[in-house]
Image (cartoon, grey):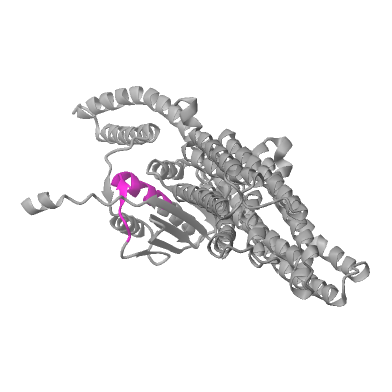
Amino acid sequence: MSLLRQHRWYVAAAGITLAFAVVSLTVPPGRALTAICNLEYLFLILAACGAMFVNARSALGANRRFWALMGSGCILWALHQSAYVYYEVLRQTTPPDPWFMDVVLFFHPIPMIAIVGLRAHRAEGEQKFRVGTLDFLLLLAWWMFLYAFLVFPSQYVLLDVAKYDRNYNSLYMVECSILVLVLGIASSRASAAWRVVYLNLMAASALYALDSGAINLALTNGRYYTGSLYDVPLMGAVSWMAAAALTARQAKFTHGNPPRKWQWGSRIAPRLAMLAILSLPALGLWTFLYDKSPPEARTFRLYAVLAAMLVLGVFLFLRQYVQDQVLMRLLEDSRHSYENQHRLQSHLVQKEKLASLGHLVADAAREIDHPLCAIMVHSEQLWANGRLSDEQGSMVRKIVYQARRTRDLVANLLSFARQSHGERVDVDLAPLLQRGAQMLEAKHRIGRISVAVTIEKDLPRVTGNANQLFQAFYEIMENAMDAMAEVGGGSLQVSAFQHSGDAVLQFSDTGPGMTAPERVFDPFYTTKPVGKGTGLGLSAAYGVVQDHGGQITCQNKSEGGALFILRLPAAQPALAQPAAEAAKA
């Protein structure tokens, strides 16, 4: 894109300003020049307002709020200028002084100053936006108080036009200067695209503020008339704002944190709010001790201070309440983040243990398998020899049986080491739980250990390997029954239900509980006597659950016994067949 095309709106703004300067020099003062000045000024303000609201419509988040606030300020500005058009163009008379529309003009920079609390150039959360909004409302109430404190006594209580003009113009210049200041602060902490927008708006606002002061002096000295050269900078300022808004439509805005040396600027809004609160007692004390105004004006100012203290106190309370809620939410998020990190770390450690164990078991099982095969082959050959005595045959049969049992154990170890996924299908968990409970009840004496299975009617299916899942459930239930058998009996409650899109299984027993719940999934960790447990059952169950994308935890219940909780992601529903294929079927 060429340089001229890139800055075409600024060139157009300069052209419009130059054209008005030519008109101001060539057209004599009168009705025609007054109409041209007022209508062109109103048109430029509406153009800037329209460009800002178009930007707000196409933007998102804080960008949208930024342009909406800027456009709101321009609407107030346009309302004031429309009233001028009504008086000077339609009625061909001078607006009254003092004038109610001066209040509208006074408040038009306040939505623009709100960018201090908004910080559109930074990526802020919704809670930050709420705090910034309360800061803006508090400052808005403060400006309303200042206007009532300084301007209203000479406008509505005791009319004094000279004092009204002096106080109004001074307060308005302070307000415009603050707008220029906050735009400069924002530009120092923004990215390149935002800096261009802020600097252009700051320069245009500075030009407007300087020319407004010059016009006020010219009015005092009787040298101003509508359409004079004093109005040329006003045209330039408002056209400059419109050009900045139009050019921003092609900019690529980014968000980020400010440099450390400028981070103090992000706290300027709450500091201004604090200054506003502290200024009220000082202004009230000044009114009571040093104000030489008539009693009516002093009384009005004291009532204004009391009302402002009440309103600003309410805003301050709301701001503190919102801030407390934000801090509590941050603490809660930090706690959840710590718990998730700790859980993730535990899972990673457990996976590393299982992976290391898998390599060790695989190597050991392969080394055992070779001599074991030789033992089985030779013992079977010896068994087939009919010349053995009955006692010798019985001994060979025992050797073959134990060798086969050992080979099955080696096969299980190899299966554990491989951690193979197996065939994955949609599995109904209810039959697996019921079958495991029935097998274990038959194994233990029913009178001493009972098993109750409660399954929710709409329990979702899970995608996985049915054999692996059954083995995991069986290991957990068998571990619970072995623990209860050691204390003379008990009950095992198995429940399955759906929660947050997952299938949740709970195995709750009334046994003695776990000695170290955090170690139950460690390989080779067992509290059973030697020869009754290898410590691999729950480790294998942990690996199966993790392999299926789920979670498994173990904890002791306060009333006694252990509780295992499994969470398995529900299977995704199959995509529906297209209507055409369904019709064909």
Q: Nearer the viewer, residue 559 or 219?
A: 219
Count of numbered tags: 0
Note whether 366 is above or below 221 in the view shown: above
Q: Residue at x 57, y 45 (%)?
A: 27
Would you say residue 460 sits in the magenta stretch? yes
Where does the image place residue 525, in percent across and percent down from the top left?
Answer: 52, 41
Residue 544 in the image: above or below residue 288? above
Quarter assignment of residue 429? bottom left
Q: Is residue 91 left or right of residue 274?
A: left
> Residue 164 vs residue 523: left or right?
right
Asked whether the viewer can see residue 352, the reply is yes
Is the N terminus in the top left, top right, bottom left or bottom right quadrant? top left
- Above or below residue 246? Residue 93 is below
Across and down, in percent, residue 300 comes to: 80, 74
Q: Residue at x 54, y 39 (%)?
A: 19
Residue closest to the eye, 84 or 578:
84
Q: Position of residue 200 (x, y in %)?
A: 61, 39
The residues colored magenta run: 459-476
The verdict on residue 379 being magenta is: no
Residue 149 or 275: which is nearer the viewer? 149
In the picture as drawn, the residue positioned furthest to the left comes out as 584
- Between residue 191 and residue 9, name the one nearer to us: 9
Residue 122 in view in this figure: no
**Residue reaching furthest right?**
289
Looking at the image, residue 148 sits to the left or right of residue 243; the answer is right
The image shows residue 58 at horizontal and vertical percentages of 44, 47
Dominant SS in magenta: helix
